[in-house]
Amino acid sequence: MRKAELRKNHEEYDEAIKRYRDFIKKCLNAKNVIKSQEKQDLAESVLLRVCAYWESFTNEHIVDCVNIEHAGLKQYFGLKKMHHPNRELCEALILGDRYRSFRSWDDFLGFSKKVLPANSNPFLEVRKSHMGLIDEVYIIRNYLSHYSAYARRKLHSMYKNKYKMSKFLEPGRFLLAYKAKRLWRYFDAFDAVSNDMKKSY
């Protein structure tokens, strides 16, 4: 794989973000067809799908980056005698035979630094403001995925610390308040991280 091909990896992800943005926009603009509660449910569902695309993209992309520049991978795993690894081996070493979960963007970024040199790590280009918004989305996502007491406390803490909100709101209401300003801000962040990364190619 050549470095120029990394840009192509963004195409499916970028198209998915655009498609879901257009979809939820149509839903929110629908009058007398989709009720308010249903719009909240749809906003939550779309955010979950966006997270899934983001995770898939970052996992695939870090494998491709390592396949191009594998010096960091060899050092991380102590594979001194290994020649250029194929993509399948890179994927096996990085993702393993199970689902690899990162607690936050900083957690993912820290791992990327271990397997990629700085001059070949597009994830370093992502701005902190965008990283922070994606971490917020994952706090929402964790609550929607589990509805556990712990996930609820984490989400309520985010509301208090980031938005000065004392009252707990279900994510759909939170996302669609103020003409869905927060939802569009999150979509903008998912768009922006892709654009940030493209600067390094």
Image (tube, grey):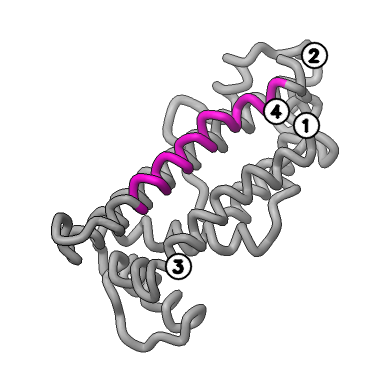
Residue lying farthest to the front in this orientation: 31
Q: For marks 3 and 1, give the one nearer the viewer.
A: 3
Which residue is painted at 31% across and 70% down in the image? 152
23 up-or-down from 105: above or below? above
- The part of the image, by quadrant, that contains residue 139 is bottom left
Which residue is painted at 53% across and 57% down in the image? 134
Q: Are marks 3 and 2 in contact (CB under 8 Å)?
A: no
Which residue is painted at 75% across and 22% down in the image? 4
* Residue named by callout 1: 72
Q: Is residue 18 magenta?
A: yes
* Residue named by callout 4: 65
42 up-or-down from 147: above or below? above
Q: Which residues are magenta?
A: 5-25
Q: Are marks 3 and 1 in contact (CB under 8 Å)?
A: no
Q: Are marks 3 and 4 in contact (CB under 8 Å)?
A: no
Give the distance between the C-alpha atoms of the residues marked 2 and 1, in whole angstroms.
14 Å
Q: For marks 1 and 4, give the one nearer the viewer.
A: 4
Dot placed on the residue nearer the N-terminal end, 3 or 1: 1
Name the side, left or right, on which 161 lies relative to 5.
Answer: left
179 up-or-down from 85: above or below? below
Dot placed on the residue nearer the N-terminal end, 3 or 2: 2
Give the distance between the C-alpha atoms of the residues marked 3 and 2, in whole angstroms.
50 Å
* Residue named by callout 3: 182
Give the distance between the C-alpha atoms of the residues marked 1 and 4, in whole angstroms.
11 Å
* Residue named by callout 2: 81
Between 59 and 15, the one nearer to me in the picture:
15
Under mark 3, the amino acid is: Arg
